[in-house]
Image (tube, rainbow, N blue to C red):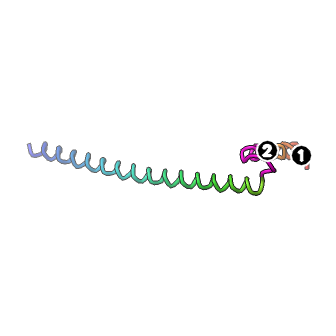
Amino acid sequence: MAKLKLVEANEKIAEGVVAGYKKIEEGVVGGYKKIEEGAVEGFGRIADKFVDNFLAKEGESIEEAKERMAAEQRAREEKSACGEN
């Protein structure tokens, strides 16, 4: 009988430990995700501002400038892959 009570108490302790760990894990992961989202959003705003100020042509939107630059980069890579300089 005493052994049964000991097993039950041990199971309750284990459940409590697991529940506490899950709460801590959720808090840490949630905090990390918030920091990551903030960093990515901040980088995106800075990148957009840079493109707008320095790389976009007159009357060209930020998205149009990014598309143009990506197309130019693909053309350079294709030219390089063909062995042209």
| Total numbered circles | 2
Q: Position of residue 22 (x, y in %)?
A: 35, 48
Left or right: 68 with respect to 83?
left
Q: Are marks 2 and 1 in contact (CB under 8 Å)?
A: no
Q: Using residue 79 as the reference point, say whether residue 70 is left or right of it.
A: left
Name which residue lies at 34% across and 51% down.
21
Closer-to-camera residue (40/46): 46
What residue appears at the point 54 percent right and 54 percent down from the top-left corner? 38
Residue positioned 86% across, 47% down in the render: 80
Whether residue 2 sits left or right of residue 36 in the image: it is left
Q: Nearer the viewer, residue 40 or 62?
A: 62
Secondary structure of the residue carrying tag 2 is helix
In the image, residue 20 lies at what x, y percent?
30, 51
Q: Nearer the viewer, residue 58 or 4?
A: 58
Residue placed at 17% from the left, 47% from the top? 9
Residue type indicated by callout 1: Gly
Question: Which SS class for mark 1?
Answer: loop
What is the magenta range? 56-68
Identify the residue at the far left of this view.
1
Q: In this rendered view, identify the residue nearer to me: 47 or 2.
A: 47
Pointer 2: what residue?
Answer: 68
Is residue 42 a member of the stretch shown in magenta?
A: no
* Residue type marked 2: Arg
Q: Which mark is residue 75?
A: none
Q: Is residue 60 magenta?
A: yes
Circle 2: is it few (<14), some (14-19), or many (20+) Cα within 10 Å?
some
Give the image location of residue 59, x and y in percent: 79, 47
Residue tagged 1: 83
Residue 77 coordinates in the image, percent (x, y): 82, 45
